[in-house]
Image (cartoon, rainbow, N blue to C red):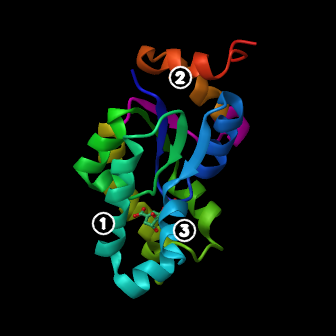
Amino acid sequence: MKRNIILTGFMGCGKSTIGRLTSSLTGFEYIDMDMLIQRQHSMSVSEIFEVYGENYFRKAERGICKLCSLISSYIIATGGGVIKDEDNMHNLSRNGVIVYLSSSPGKIYSNLKHDNSRPLLSGGNKLEKITQMLNERTPLYEKYAEICIDVSNTFPENAAKLLLHEVMQISSIRASLEVNNENLHN
Ligand code: S3P
């Protein structure tokens, strides 16, 4: 039996917005892995990258993934790079259904063009960076996902409903969703 819903996907694809909406539809609590790391350090992700470097951030991210295997009834928004580490995905999938929210480079760019909070996209041509990183990572997002939802042209409210519909088809988590929210079918 699995008891969490894990949202993966590239930076700026809408994991937090869709995660919060899915949380309100299910009664599962919403958490964001980057927020937890930021709170632990009282620093933004950009500051952590700048002061301690990316490897340090990835280590903190691995620690949070381990913790996530121990909690239940959560919608967990991951950082976009979580899929680069096989152990992370092993830990997350122990108690969670992995959902990949896929989006196009153009949509991601339009979501992030005025955003300076992603250190891996700072400097240079942002659209090119997004396109290149997305090409590299897409096989990994797809490899680990039990459910893939294309959110490029979908309103977040509809994406959350679709996500829930798809998750309900997965028998290993259906029961825990039903326990949490008797109104799911209404
Ligand atoms: C990263 C994604 C970010 C954050 C960090 C690294 C990545 O999270 O974890 O900047 O490697 O894709 P979001 O996907 O929430 O932006």
Residue located beneath label 3 in the image:
39
Residue 54 appears in the figure: yes
Position of residue 140 relative to residue 27, above or below, is: below
- Please state the horizontal and vertical placement of residue 57, each as a whole percent of the image: 36, 71
Circle 2 or circle 3, nearest the eye: 3
Circle 2 or circle 1, nearest the eye: 1
- Please state the horizontal and vertical placement of residue 174, each as a whole percent of the image: 51, 17
Looking at the rendering, in which quadrant would you find the N terminus? top left
Q: Is mark 3 in CB contact (under 8 Å) with mark 1?
A: no
Say few, some or many: other residues with alpha carbon within 10 Å of mark 2 (under 14 / 14 to 19 / 20 or more). some
Question: Which of the two labelled residues, at mark 2 and mark 3, occupies the earlier sequence position?
Answer: 3
In reply to whether residue 146 is colored magenta, the answer given is yes
* Image position of 67 (left or right of 162): left
Q: Residue at x 46, y 28 (%)?
A: 3
| Three-letter residue code for mark 1 | Lys
Task: For marks 2 and 1, give the CA distance.
Answer: 32 Å
Q: Which residues are magenta?
A: 145-159
Looking at the rendering, in which quadrant would you find the C terminus? top right
Q: Which one is in front, 13 or 87?
A: 87
Q: Secondary structure at mark 3?
A: helix
In reply to whether residue 119 is colored magenta, the answer given is no
Residue located beneath label 1 in the image:
59
Question: Which of the two labelled residues, at mark 2 and mark 1, occupies the earlier sequence position?
Answer: 1
Say few, some or many: other residues with alpha carbon within 10 Å of mark 1 (under 14 / 14 to 19 / 20 or more). few
Q: Which one is in front, 127 or 121?
A: 121
| Three-letter residue code for mark 3 | Arg
Task: For marks 3 and 1, give the CA distance.
Answer: 15 Å
* Image position of 105 (left or right of 23): left
| Three-letter residue code for mark 2 | Glu
Residue located beneath label 2 in the image:
166
